[in-house]
Amino acid sequence: MAGFKKLMQDAGTYRKEYDVALKNLTRMQSQYDALEKKFADDGYPFEVETEQGTKKAPIVTTLEALRRDILAYMNALGFTPLGMKRMEAAAGAGARKEEQKDPLAVLLLEQIAADSS
């Protein structure tokens, strides 16, 4: 978490409320790194033979899902150009309102709503 937290602090976007999301992102990144190493150590087995024929290896499916989830968290936390742009736009819109809303909270809620639909 320290690495992602430091990046947010350097960018001026860190808040204590983001710690849970940062812990989740760190955990997913650690899982991804461990699986990527295992995948490489095993010789990158993209396919496995089953009784029904050749299928995508389960580790590939898991890596794809983790990569997708990591990118969603990174976007929501402003670690990508798109995420930063959205945070800046949300911050600008929030500044115009009488009650300023947290741009990351807005983005996280939008991401959760998009994922559940």
Image: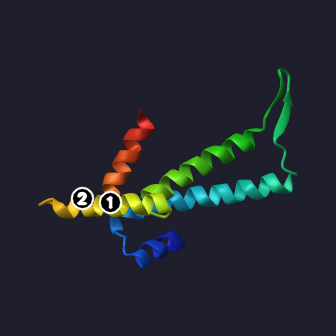
In the drawing, does residue 103 fall left or right of residue 84?
left
Q: Amino acid at mark 1?
A: Ala
Callout 1: 10 Å neighbours few (<14), some, many (20+)? few
The percent position of residue 81, horizontal first and vertical second, equals 48, 62
User: Eyeballing the image, is 116 above or below 40?
Assistant: above
Q: Which residue is mark 1?
A: 89
Q: Secondary structure at mark 2?
A: helix
In the drawing, does residue 39 fall left or right of residue 65?
right
Q: Amino acid at mark 2?
A: Ala
Determine contact: label 1, label 2, CB under 8 Å: yes
The percent position of residue 22, horizontal first and vertical second, equals 46, 62
Q: Residue at x 40, y 61 (%)?
A: 85
Q: Residue at x 30, y 58 (%)?
A: 90
**Outermost residue to the top:** 52
Q: Secondary structure at mark 1?
A: helix
Mark 1–mark 2 distance (CA, rounded to whole Å): 6 Å
Q: Which residue is mark 2?
A: 93
